[in-house]
Structure formats: C-alpha cells, structure tokens
Amino acid sequence: MQVINEELLVLDCYEEFTDVFLKEISDTFLLYYLYDYKIVLEKPNNLGYSLLYKLTIEELEKTKRYFLDNLNKGFFKLS
C-alpha cells in the first residue's frame, strides 16, 4: 500500500492512478466541450411527473449539499 496523505491509502496496483483519489483533483472540472445534441423521440412523451422514490430528511439534506457544492464549483449550469 502506498500512503498518499494521512487519510488516503492506495493499493500498489493503483499507484499510477493516485491522482484521481486526491480531493483537490476531484474538485476541478474536466475540460468543457460545447455540444448540443437533440434527442428526437419516436413517440410523444406522455409519462408525466412522478417521484422515483421517497427520501428521508437526511438523504434530502445530503442531496441538497451535493448539488450546492457542485453548483458553487461551477459543475452545473442552467440549460
């Protein structure tokens, strides 16, 4: 095992990929390429709106934190 920092241990077989485990690397966004693909549906969309599943308050708070963190990093934008 290789020690990356005091919190992160990486197996030797993943040594060449150690950079992907670093927090400062994961907080950066990949290069952005502007492509606008249009999806043409074969039939009209009549699915309507429904929740996938119910979330607990704790799950909702974690989801909100995830979206706000990534919004502040610039990973999301209005479309």
Image: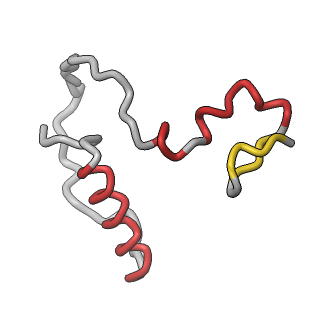
Callout count: 0
Residue drawn at point x = 77 percent, y = 30 percent: 15
Coloration mode? secondary structure
Query: Left or right: where does residue 33 sit relative to residue 19?
Result: left
Q: Position of residue 78 (x, y in %)?
A: 13, 42
Q: Which sits in the foreground, 64 or 46?
A: 64
Q: On the image, which quarter does residue 3 sit in? A: top right
Residue drawn at point x = 27 percent, y = 63 percent: 50
Residue drawn at point x = 49 percent, y = 37 percent: 25
Residue drawn at point x = 61 percent, y = 32 percent: 19
Q: Position of residue 66 (x, y in %)?
A: 37, 59
- Residue at the farthest bottom position: 57
Query: Left or right: where does residue 16 sit relative to residue 52?
Result: right
Q: On the image, which quarter does residue 20 sit in? A: top right
Q: Is residue 18 above or below residue 51?
A: above
Q: Is residue 48 above or below residue 35?
A: below
- Residue at the farthest left position: 79
Q: Is residue 35 above or below residue 78?
A: above
Q: Where's the N terminus, which quadrant?
A: top right
Q: Where's the C terminus, which quadrant?
A: top left
Q: Position of residue 9 (x, y in %)?
A: 76, 48
Query: Left or right: where does residue 37 sit relative to residue 59?
Result: left
Q: Is residue 39 above or below residue 21?
A: above
